[in-house]
Amino acid sequence: MTLDEFAALMDRATTRMNEQAKAGMPGYASAGEFEQTVLAQLRVCCEGLAGAEPSFHDSAFPDIVVNGFGVEVKFTTRSTWHGTGNSIFEGMRDETAKEIALVYCRSDIREIRWRWYTDCIKGIRISHSPRYMIDMDGADSFFDQIGMTIEEFRQADLRSKMGIVKDHVRQRMGDGERLWWFDEDREHTVPVNVRLYRLLDAETKDIMRAESALMCPQIFKGSRSRGKYDDAALYMLTQHGVFAPQTRDLFSAGSVAGKDRGGDYLIRAVQNNAHQIAEAAERLRDELFVEYWGEACPPDQRLRRWLELADSHRPNDPPSQYIEFG
């Protein structure tokens, strides 16, 4: 079977299914029913060219194999041509399927469409395992955006693949959003056991405050700046699973500024945490600085650069004139 013959087969099967669905025939009311309908219609339409069979496992991708071609089946009750595809890691990939078509049924309007799978992948959705996002109407596919074919992406090693995904997601994040970093040695995201900041021991609290201050120099913005502690809160949550509902108090409360009252609590809190900040500047991964500062920075230059960034947020009273590192 050639590619053109397979495409013609998909056209015939989809036409038959749309006729049946519009006529109110059974087989289009649930995902399980629809998958059996697709398999049956493909068998009818093969016309001696090949046979259509389920894949080697119920959880395999794609669902159906037709003489070296694959058919993935999707069903939705929602009023949309968007959906979630398979895992980008394709752990249960049926390697006998060279090219894969996607058949998508919207039960709300009883309509069925098909497209080449690679053409309708519009991006990556991050959940417990990164999954493709499907758009049956989309013109610009994820693979067009990253300048790779789906096969090139499939063959990339895990570290390279996750780097591509991170860059893709990072470029599309909105204000106030942060990337949940992936464990590059396995396919699932890093599990997060959420802890309350106030229940941590004193040493761990100091480390959390130091890292978040280092990664988020915008904490030095003016007191009326809205959201200046948001990134610090997100850093602790996404990187360490630590939830700090009153993040402002980590840097401006008297308990972290020392015994003296009055003056600049934020500066004193950072001064009291200077040793841990310096240690974090040497220890933390460069990827984090790219993520939070927007640039890479060698460890021996991070403290100097951090002070420059802090001063840029408070130019009229630069923090660098108060903060020193031994």
Image: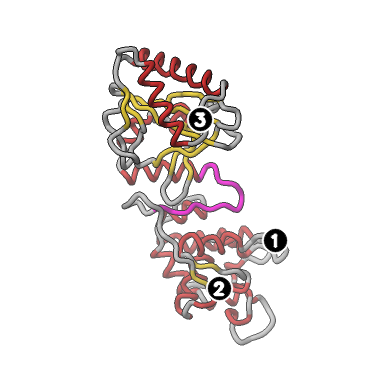
Q: CA distance from mark 3 to mark 2?
A: 62 Å
Q: Residue furthest right?
A: 224
Density class for disc 1 (Cα within 10 Å; few <14, some 14-19, many ≥20) is few
**Main secondary structure found in the magenta portion:** loop
Q: Quadrant of the C terminus?
A: bottom left
Residue type, label 1: Ser
Q: Nearer the viewer, mark 3 or mark 2?
A: 3
- Viewer-side residue, 192 vs 24: 24
**Mark number displayed over residue 28:** 3
Q: Where is mark 2, residue-wise? A: 270
Q: Residue 252 lies in what quarter of the image?
A: bottom right
Q: Residue at x 62, y 70 (%)?
A: 246
Q: Quadrant of the N terminus?
A: top left
**Mark number displayed over residue 225:** 1
Q: Nearer the viewer, mark 3 or mark 1?
A: 3
Q: Residue at x 31, y 33 (%)?
A: 55
Residue extent of the magenta highlight: 170-182
